[in-house]
Amino acid sequence: MAIMESERTNATPHESLAFDLLTAGNVSGAVAAITASVDAQAALESLAQLCKRAYRDLKSVPAMTAVAWEAVGFGQRCASTSPDSESSRRYKARVRAIAYNVAANCWPGWGDPVEINSLDIAEGLKLAERSYALVQELGLGDKEIGTALWLVGALQMASGQLSVATAQFVRAEAAFHAAQLPAQAAMAQGYAALADKILRESDPRGAESLAAMIQSLRGLESREGRFFADQLLTADRIFSSR
């Protein structure tokens, strides 16, 4: 459920310097190497790339979230000082995407080979909530609302807030139905079933409901349906072993 972005194969000189500083543990220096070198829009793009490299290359969720919060603050300051509403909106939209993607990488349910602890999940939840607030502020559509609510719920589930997470998944399902996205709606329903299975560990009905939703997703015979079904199976395996 990450927001898809194009991957750059070559880092710019200031991005390379920033990554070296981040590797050495100098978050503020890494951010300054970017923000002092290019215009604000380009700086946000470079900070987004730095977040990706913190996760992909350093496999450090704390470094990634630290850069993300710097990016969020920088982008919000740029938005507040923008000369017109359109440029302000662009900054907020970019901040929303950065917050969402970094929050998504704080969720342990993907099964990536990256260590994620409870503090990382808590930071991810705060970023997901910030992203959702910007979805509302920007007046985005039902698809974006559903996606943001799903991530908030996923991170609440990871932090053990199962009943609250279920409510978010139900809200996400309703938003996806409104957007006429049946695969996403079924996916959200599947995560509600997974949260219910975890909450009612000794009750076989939770497992039966989850299995039915996975079968339903596969029955859609779409690439999205298969992806969501496979991801639910992965998340079930991960959370069942926690």
Image (cartoon, helix red, strand yellow):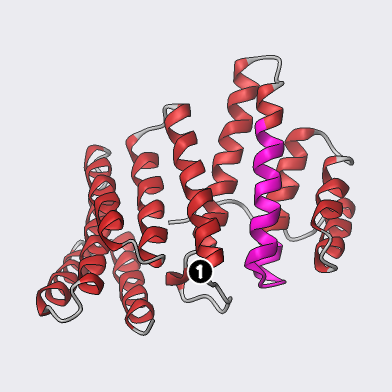
Q: Quadrant of residue 52?
A: bottom right
Q: Quadrant of residue 9?
A: bottom right
Task: Please provide percent x and percent y for residue 201.
Answer: 20, 78
Q: Secondary structure at mark 1?
A: helix
Q: Measured along the vertical axis of the image, is residue 169 above or below residue 118?
A: above
Which residue is painted at 56% across and 34% down in the image?
Answer: 93
To which residue does mark 1 refer?
118
Left or right of residue 6, residue 136 in this image: left
Q: Is residue 128 visible?
A: yes
Which residue is painted at 63% across and 23% down in the image?
Answer: 88
**Nearer-the-camera pick, 207 or 28:** 28
**Nearer-the-camera pick, 34 or 6:** 34
Q: Measured along the vertical axis of the image, is residue 42 above or below residue 54?
A: above
Which residue is painted at 73% across and 49% down in the image?
Answer: 47
Category of crowding for the residue at label 1, using alpha-carbon neighbours closer than 10 angstroms: few (below 14), some (14–19), many (at least 20): few
Task: Please provide percent x and percent y for residue 218.
Answer: 22, 68
**Magenta stretch prevailing secondary structure:** helix
Specify the quadrant that holds the N terminus: bottom left
Q: Is residue 3 visible?
A: no
Task: Please provide percent x and percent y for residue 157.
Answer: 35, 63
Magenta region: which residues?
53-76
Residue 24 in the magenta stretch? The answer is no
**Nearer-the-camera pick, 30 or 85:** 30
